[in-house]
Image (cartoon, rainbow, N blue to C red):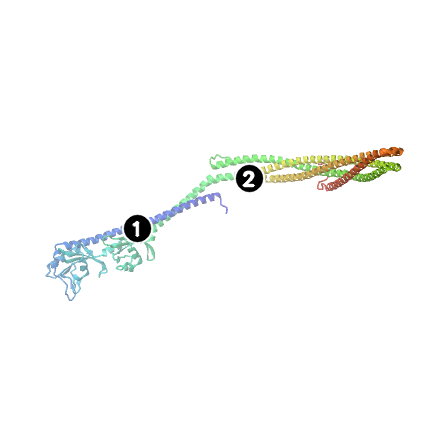
């Protein structure tokens, strides 16, 4: 159920007011109930006090009359009364004996007092001699009536200075009667007792006539707990309160005060007042319903008044809220509805200075801000769209550049690998030939060493015989010719090895230049990728700013936020691809640098091998020269054997030098062979690198579209 704000406002205010009224109602009702109870208690207490005053006044008058009779001059002569009923054998009238003048005077006095007090049932006296007279001259006296033995006489004897009152009793007329007695003294001697029987009917009628409200009544209870008057329950009269009813016993226990009791099944309130002179108790009882009747009426009036007040407040709040709150809220709602429809130029005109006016001013300012923001958002949207198109074009160009770079890298690697492969093939062939030549030179050197040893032996034998020297000289000349020939062949082989090494060195230098160019091209591609990455960063930043502006625009910028998010994702993908290409270019650059380093090491090794081969060539040239010198010497020996002996020492030294040169040559050949072996190993490593480059080049950019020519992007 949808409730309007007016209904909620009124309901809330009425609920608060109703709660306040309910609290006030409960407090007032409780106060009224308490005040009603207290009012009844006070009223009943006052009423009971008045009744007690009347009862006390009534009984005090009887006491005073009895005391006055006992103090009268005639009372001093009551022992002279001779009328008596002691010793009678049958009941008889209470008339005075004719010969009893004092008795007649006493009867006349008692009759006057009784006629003056209608409540007095009988005024009588008894003396110490047994004489008895009464104002009732026609009453019947019991047989042998002796006043000295009667309770009223016996109870009065102990109290000599004041009247005493007997307990009430029910008379033959079914009326409550009590007796006031007073001793008659002569000095300190009791000569008789005067008594007055008082009918309590006047008191019980008084108690019965007093009403406490509509349902309240009084109960008179004697100090011994005997009910003297209960107008609501006459059957309780002259019964003990405990025998009559529990509530009477409960109230009788109170000296004074009040207590809730149940009478005939109805909740009632009882009030007890004890007479300070008689000790009798007056009980006031009234139904709770009657006590609460004023409270109920006050509650009903308060409820009616509160309901009418709530209704009036509801009407006033309804009219007030409609005019002061609902109408301005409807104006605000209409304003917001216009804004929701996109009418950002809408403005609310008013002349209010309260909070609603402040809200309308804020809404007008908000509408102006929204209008400005929407214009800015549209401009930003167009700018972002243009940036997105530029980013898309830049992305395509970057992709094309990447593909071209991949293609160039693959092509360059293939070309470089082809050149390297050809160089390695030439280097391998040259190395093989060089190794073969070095092996030949090594064998020649070994043969030369052997022949030098033979020459030494011959020179040793030459000293023993000239013939042997001549023969050996001729053989040595022939051997020297052969050694010269072999040395010349070794020198030519070394020259050819040097030429091959120089060619390999030139190819390696060119390969190194190509690899450097490849590294430079990779660095150029890296710079292009850096530019692309910067463009992607700027695109991502623009997309983020556009998303923020779209978020500020709310629902109106939601579609633009989606476009901005897609542009941002595309820029992130471009950045990721750029990083991947940059990583690949970096790997290419590292490979190119390693290749350049390997080629440089190869060039260095080849240069060292060339230098070693050059040294071998020079050594062989020296060998040729030495062999030629030896041949000339042998010829000289053959021509002039007589000079052989003198020259033998020189020849021996020459042979030793030849042997040393041969040893050096053999060692140089061994080192050249090792260098050539190392060169072959480097050639194999270079071949493996070439194979790797070819494999990498063949597995190049397979995901790139076909390269577009200029003007076709």
Where does the image place residue 90, in percent across and percent down from the top left? 16, 66
Above or below 281: residue 564: above
- The image shows residue 22 at horizontal and vertical percentages of 40, 47
Q: Quadrant of the C terminus?
A: top right
Name the residue that disc number 1 marks. 41
In the image, taking residue 567 as reference, residue 278 lies left or right, namely left
User: Label 1 near label 2: C-beta < 8 Å?
Assistant: no
Between the residue at mark 2 and the residue at mark 1, the CA separation in whole angstroms equals: 73 Å
Front position in the image: 535 or 117: 535
Label count reads 2
Left/right of residue 639 with respect to residue 504 in the rendered view: right
Taking depth in this image into account, of 589 and 469 the one nearest to the observer is 469
| Mark sitting earlier along the chain (2/1) | 1
Neighbor class of circle 1 (other Cα within 10 Å; few <14, some 14-19, many 20+) is many
Between 579 and 30, the one nearer to me in the picture: 579
Residue sitting at x 31%, y 49%: 38
Crowdedness of circle 2 by 10 Å Cα count: few (<14), some, many (20+)?
few
Find numbered disc 2 in the image and state the secondary structure of the residue it sits on: helix
* Residue 33 percent location from the top left of the image: 34, 49
Q: Position of residue 295 (x, y in %)?
A: 35, 49
Decide if residue 347 is in sight here: no
Task: Return the residue at label 2.
Answer: 340
Q: Label 1: state its secondary structure.
A: helix
């Amino acid at each position: 159920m949808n409730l309007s704000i007016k209904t909620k406002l009124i309901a809330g205010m009425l609920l608060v007011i109703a709660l306040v009224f309910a609290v006030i109602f409960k407090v007032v009702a409780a106060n009224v109930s308490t005040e009603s109870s207290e009012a009844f208690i006070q009223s009943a207490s006052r009423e009971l006090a008045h009744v007690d005053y009347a009862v006390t006044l009534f009984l005090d008058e009887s006491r005073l009359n009895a005391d006055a009779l006992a103090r009268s001059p005639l009372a001093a002569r009551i022992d002279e009364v001779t009328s008596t009923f002691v010793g009678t054998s049958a009941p008889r009238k209470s008339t005075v004996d004719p010969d009893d003048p004092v008795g007649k005077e006493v009867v006349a006095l008692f009759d006057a007092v009784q006629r003056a007090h209608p409540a007095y049932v009988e005024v009588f006296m008894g003396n110490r001699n047994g004489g008895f007279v009464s104002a009732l001259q026609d009453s019947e006296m019991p047989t042998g009536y002796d006043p000295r033995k009667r309770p009223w006489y016996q109870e009065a004897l102990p109290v000599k200075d004041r009247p005493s009152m007997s307990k009430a009793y029910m008379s033959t007329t079914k009326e409550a009667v009590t007796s006031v007695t007073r001793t008659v003294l002569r000095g300190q001697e009791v000569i008789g007792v005067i008594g007055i029987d008082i009918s309590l009917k006047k008191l019980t009628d008084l108690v019965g006539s007093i009403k406490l409200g509509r349902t309240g009544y009084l109960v008179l209870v004697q100090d011994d707990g005997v009910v003297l008057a209960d107008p609501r329950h006459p059957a309780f009269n002259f019964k003990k309160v405990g025998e009559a009813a529990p509530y009477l016993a409960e109230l009788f226990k109170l000296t004074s005060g009040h207590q809730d009791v149940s009478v005939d099944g109805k909740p009632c309130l009882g009030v007890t007042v004890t007479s300070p002179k008689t000790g009798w108790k007056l009980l006031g009882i009234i139904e709770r319903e009657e006590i609460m009747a004023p409270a109920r009426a006050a509650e009903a009036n308060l409820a009616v008044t509160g309901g009418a007040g709530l209704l009036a407040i509801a009407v006033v709040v309804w009219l007030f809220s409609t005019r002061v709150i609902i109408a301005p809220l409807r104006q605000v709602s209409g304003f917001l509805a216009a804004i929701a429809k996109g009418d950002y130029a809408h403005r609310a005109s008013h002349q209010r200075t309260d909070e609603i006016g402040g809200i309308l001013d804020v809404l007008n300012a908000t509408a102006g801000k929204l209008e400005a923001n929407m214009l800015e958002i549209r401009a930003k949207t167009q700018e972002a769209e243009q940036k997105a198109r530029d980013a898309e074009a830049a992305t395509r160009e970057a992709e094309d550049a990447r593909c071209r770079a991949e293609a160039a890298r693959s092509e360059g690697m293939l070309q470089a690998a082809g050149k390297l492969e050809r160089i390695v093939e030439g280097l391998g062939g040259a190395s093989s030939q060089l190794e073969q030549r070095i092996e030949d030179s090594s064998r020649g050197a070994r043969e030369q060493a052997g022949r030098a040893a033979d020459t030494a032996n011959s020179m040793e034998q030459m000293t023993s015989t000239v013939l042997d020297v001549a023969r050996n000289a001729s053989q040595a000349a022939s051997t020297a010719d052969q050694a010269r020939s072999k040395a010349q062949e070794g020198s030519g082989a070394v020259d050819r090895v040097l030429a091959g090494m120089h060619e390999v060195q030139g190819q390696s230098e060119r390969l190194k230049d190509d690899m450097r160019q490849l590294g430079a091209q990779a660095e150029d591609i890296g710079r292009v990728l850096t530019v692309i990455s910067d463009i992607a960063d700027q695109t991502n930043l623009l997309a983020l700013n556009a998303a923020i502006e779209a978020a500020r625009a709310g629902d109106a910028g939601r579609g633009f936020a989606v476009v901005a998010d897609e542009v941002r994702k595309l820029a992130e993908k471009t950045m990721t691809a750029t990083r991947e290409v940059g990583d690949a270019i970096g790997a290419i650059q590292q490979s190119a640098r390693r290749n350049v380093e390997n080629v440089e090491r190869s060039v260095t090794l080849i240069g060292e091998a060339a230098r070693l081969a050059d040294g071998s060539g020079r050594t062989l040239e020296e060998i040729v020269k030495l062999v030629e010198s030896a041949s000339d010497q042998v010829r000289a020996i053959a021509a002039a054997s007589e000079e052989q002996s003198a020259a033998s020492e020189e020849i021996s030294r020459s042979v030793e030098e030849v042997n040393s040169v041969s040893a050096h040559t053999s060692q140089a050949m061994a080192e050249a062979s090792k260098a050539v072996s190392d060169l072959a190993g480097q050639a194999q490593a270079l071949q493996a690198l070439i194979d790797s480059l070819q494999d990498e080049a063949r597995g190049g950019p397979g995901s790139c579209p076909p390269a577009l020519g200029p003007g076709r992007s």
